Image (cartoon, grey):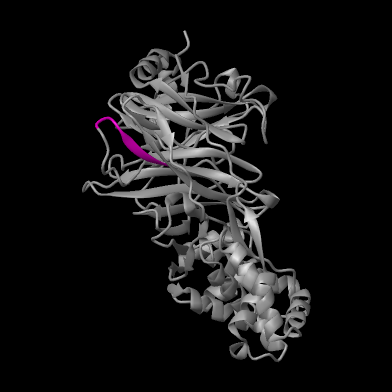
Amino acid sequence: MRLSVERKPIKIYPDPKRVIARFFFNGNERAKEVIQRVMTISEDEAFGIISPFLQEYSKRHRNITRVLNRHCSKLKPLIAELNIDYDTLTVYRKLLIGSYFTHEYSIESAAFFNPSILEDPDQSELREGEMRVIISFRAVGEGHISSITFRRALIDKNNDITVMPSGSYIDEAEIVRNAVYNKKLFFDKAISTQINIDVLNEVEGKLDHHFEYSNLRSIILDSQKLQEDDMKKLEYDKVLWLADSYYEIVFSMDTDISDRVIFPISEYERKGIEDARFVEFKHEDGSSVYYATYTAYDGALIMPKLLQTNDFYNFKIMPLYGDGAQNKNLALFPRKVNGKYVMISRIDGCNNYIMYSDKINIWEKPVLLQQPKFNWEFIQIGNCGSPIETEYGWLMITHGVGPMRRYVLGASLLKLDDPAIEIGRLKEPLLIPNSDEREGYVPNVLYSCGSIVHNGKLIIPYGISDSSTGFAEIDLNELLNKLIQDGSSISHEENTEKKEMVN
């Protein structure tokens, strides 16, 4: 007998009007030509062009003058090569130059999917039975570049969901590069990115055990000056790209959560930030921090990364290390188990693994947890976000891929004090695409990156064929009872073998 699942009437759709102003660059020679053309314009002409431009685009961007000035400043080296004194340029000419190197990018124009949900840090001024939540999404725009966007919503005492209107302006964060790097960890990661080993050995030998970005950049630039081979120079660039994978971003305090977009910054994520799985992590002293695992993609290599925040204004971002930090689909448990961090992973692209660590960014010795068992998951099984703690065990929503590459949602229950032990797994899918959910950017796909429990119900936000987001509700006790009932399909021998491997 299948579980009763209620689909909520509300859906969240992408909004192509949500745009950011990004730096636009077509190479040094074309850039110089454009700058030279702008320099032929008189001051009055420059003012006449930029003034109405600012009036028009100030309605679409929070601080368009700041953006244009920032983009103009990126051209300082080229402007100097043209024997132009940057400091003598007037305010309006700088803004005009910046405008020619700026374009609008619609962050949600192509696809909008794979939501994650968690309790908002701000639960003030609510009625009994209500919860304010933050929902993250994978948004895709031109060039199939993925970013992370947010919405705020309210779940009432009846579990009806109201999504707050999104803001009028989208804002990228300011980037801060102040990381101190551990040399061993940094170069261990560098080896996995297939950077030329001779280049790595040379750079590593010139660095202290702990170093800053400025030290590394100086060494890279000096080494490149001695190279005539462009391909070898590129290998040095790759070392810097890896360093760029460590950064902090800061959003303005006057932005709404829906105004903030985490857009690819480092070269190793230039093709997208994929499938963020947010979780509120509870420390043993009762304090909380918010983490998200996500996949950075450069068009060829996959790099699992970790995002950390306390307030959703300030974020720290770093790569994850180790044999277990491979491929996609990493999901962190919301607390330590037996004194260790715990993570679900899918290192081989097919099966679920579990791993334990003393350090949140280093993951070794993944142990097989689940393999495809039922026909609807024969191609692969994976997690749909961080496991949820219940009195009966860790509830893990899963996805399975079956015939016609159809993605469906399932569920498993793991032992509370020993999550390497699977107590039960649904024999049938929890949620499959219905006739209204099959069409979209990627047909026949339901997918989620995180669920939440409220008023005794499990609420699952889920991407609908990569085109919108819906919500499903399941009675938590009914689901847990069904998982325990279906637990007879989990063999004692399988779990005993896994436990021995972990110990």
Q: Could you say which is closer to the camera, residue 15 or residue 416?
A: 15
Point out the stretch of residues depicted in magenta. 128-134
Q: Could you say which is closer to the camera, residue 369 or residue 142?
A: 142
Q: Can residue 363 be seen in this view?
A: no
Residue at the far top: name it.
Answer: 1
Query: Which quadrant does the C terminus fall into?
Result: top left
Give the residue drawn at x 48%, y 50%.
Answer: 167
| Count of number-bearing discs | 0
Q: Relative to 412, is 227 above or below?
A: below
- Image coordinates of residue 46 in percent, x first then y, are 68, 80
- Image coordinates of residue 200 in percent, x first then y, are 59, 69
The answer to whether 446 appears left or right of 178 in the picture is right
Give the residue drawn at x 52%, y 19%.
Answer: 429
Residue 256 on the magenta span: no
Q: Could you say which is closer to the camera, residue 354 or residue 152?
A: 152
- Image coordinates of residue 445 in percent, x first then y, are 61, 29
Q: Could you say which is closer to the camera, residue 196 or residue 128?
A: 128
The answer to whether 99 appears left or right of 483 in the picture is right
Residue 131 on the magenta span: yes
The answer to whether 120 appears left or right of 96 in the picture is left
Q: Relative to 126, is 190 above or below?
A: below
Q: Quadrant of residue 392?
A: top left
Q: Can residue 276 be seen in this view?
A: yes
Q: Relative to 372, is 99 above or below?
A: below
Give the residue drawn at x 38%, y 40%.
Answer: 133
Q: Relative to 214, is 441 above or below?
A: above
Q: In which quarter of the image is residue 19?
A: bottom right
- Image coordinates of residue 292 in percent, x first then y, are 44, 48
